[in-house]
Image (cartoon, rainbow, N blue to C red):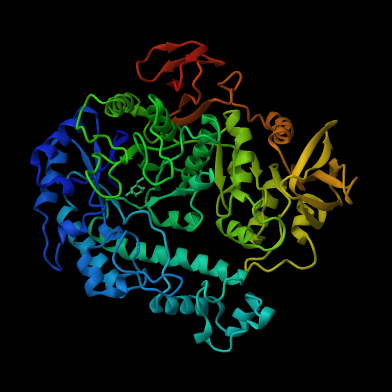
Amino acid sequence: MKTTDKFLYGGDYNPEQWLDQPEVLKQDLELMQKSKINTVTLDTFSWASIEPREGEYHFEWLDKIFDDIYQIGGHVILATPSGGRPQWMSQKYPEVNQVDEYGRRHKHGFRQNHCYSSPVYRQKTRQINTILAKRYGKHPALLMWHVSNEFGGQCFCDLCQDNWRQWLQKKYHTLDNLNQAWYLKVWSGLYSDWSQVLPPNPLGETKVHGMDLDWKRFVTDMTMDFYENEAQPLREITPNIPITTNFMAEGLDKGDYYPITGLDYSRFAKKVDIVSWDSYPAWHNDYETLADTAMKSAYTHDCFYSLKHQPFLIMESTPSCINSQQYNKAKKPGMNILSSLQQIAHGSDSTLYFQIRQAQGNSEKFHGGVIGHDSSSQNRVYQEVAQYGQKLNSIAEIKGAVKHPKVGIFYDWESNWAFNRGGAFGRPTRLGIQTLQKHYSVFWEQDIACEIINGDDDFSKYDLIVAPILYMVKDKTVDKLTKFVEAGGILISSYFTGMVDEYDRVVLGGFPTKLRTLFGINTKEIDTLYPKQHGHIEFNQKFYETKDYNQVIEATTAKVLAEYRDDFYQGTPAVVSNNLGSGKTYYLATRLGDDFLKEFYQPIIDKLHLTNDFITKPIYEVSCQTREKNGVKYHFLMNFSEEEQEVLTNRESINVEDGSIVGKRIILGKYGTLVVKEK
Ligand code: GLA
């Protein structure tokens, strides 16, 4: 597969917006070179420019851009244009337009609003992809394919409904099996004919949990199938050009940040040659510290690294502000370098921006860009982009370096779907991913590397697996976790574990037998707390508050480490541990705060020697992340605070940028960064 020695630096470039101003395009090339930009993503939204009328193609301008980019030593990531189709197509073939959950066929507009089933859209995208692959497949500037843009959304048209029924028929074979799996005797929901089976929709069925779960699986399958349809001609015509599609994160509107939950990326990642994603954390917000934002961003980077346990690409980020939120803050001086370096620190082999040149009009005209509306190389944003470009070149030896974390944080997309869908208990306080991040934060704060793993991963690489809220029981996962513990691993889990099967039906007979053996407990019931209510436990002679959920459990073989101090379950176990084989499990029956988690994890961290051995005393605001290549360890030190920070290390190291010796006392200024290495 084609690759390069350098980190990819650049981003989405939309020259089609400036074809009538050749002097602008000329200036773009100069400014790209000056800022060490070496890669552009083309064609993401230019279908209407290359095929303005059906069958009428205009590639002259794209040919020239390809050649120009090559002339300056650059690479092209070529997008397939399916993210935004031309007007003529929506008009002539209305079936390509998405139908929403109310059954309304949408008109042309926005983007990614197509039907994934439409034979016409599938044929049209294959056709344009084939033409692009034949035309540019051998161009020396072509580095990678970027299929479509930010896949998402769902369609409820008749074709999609047919596919949905076929998908269900393949899975369940008979209506009886389906009725049973979705438990449809409730509210008289039994199907007597396949034609009655519709997707979940607000005018009809929204309450059947098993249906919701299958619909989400189906949407992932349809999206991957559409992707495959696009990728097939690219693979055939250009077998050496790697293929990716840009994944996303979400949650900003709620003050959160994590990979989107709508598509199961753990499955989708298997289809791409390299994982890439678009990173837009809410730096400098008013609801958390910069270090808190950095932790969520770090978690999200680690998720994307872990999908293939390989370096990923940042396909988009912004050099200044974004456009899509209620409040879109400019990155302060130094922040772009810091946040971009964080991408590399966690395993990215690129920093790519949306966008190279800011648009003059339309919906994203104020979104940040490398080249601003003033076209100046003197403005602050451009200067910082150029400074970072220089930095990336001087640390190029790190490209391709990997990570070897010993801590796996367990996340299962399907289990999280079911967990969020479940009725009863506290609804707003479910917070599954936020809970994972609380656990992750204990390690991030101490500069201990983590991966975010799932049931398909090899658990033997880890010493510690943190798997709170393992809501859906998957036999394969339970067996693997048991083997992991028996072989000496330490496993943490919590309340809400082992509740439902893969159809989102409750597991009968109480806590599943295999989990009873694993954790040495039986579970009884779960008490939900209102947001202002708290319980208490006593652990290591200290009191800690519990919140949201107190699960009542009974210890069988487990040792009780803490008991509840209030309510009808006072005096019953709240935290237990259980020895199994050469390993050990812990079960936290209640939701506990950061203070508890720190106290709880410390002896485990010490016992497993997980402590970062380069940093003498970790500081919350300063993150140290490590990548390794050819026996060399590269440490990225990043100050996520506005104060100067003193970092003490256990050994001297070498500054990767200039080769100088770095002593054991390092001062990092506001937003300061340093990349060092040691053999
Ligand atoms: C997404 C899209 C881009 C652009 C940016 C703006 O990531 O892929 O086309 O709209 O958002 O933040």
Q: Residue at x 26, y 56 (%)?
A: 80
Q: Residue at x 24, y 34 (%)?
A: 372
Residue 353: where, in percent of width, then height? Answer: 32, 39
Image height of 203 relative to 435, above or below: below
Q: Nearer the viewer, residue 388 or 467?
A: 388
Total tally of numbered discs in the picture: 0
Along the horizontal axis of the image, is 371 left or right of 532?
A: left
Along the horizontal axis of the image, is 24 left or right of 12?
A: left
Q: Quadrant of residue 7?
A: top left
Residue 508: where, in percent of width, then height? Answer: 76, 68
Image height of 604 relative to 192, above or below: above
Q: Quadrant of residue 25?
A: top left
Q: Residue at x 58, y 42 (%)?
A: 461
Residue 47: where, in percent of width, then height? Answer: 21, 58
Q: Quadrant of residue 613?
A: top right
Furthest toward the bottom, the residue is 192
Image height of 412 relative to 161, above or below: above
Residue 211: where, in percent of width, then height? Answer: 57, 72
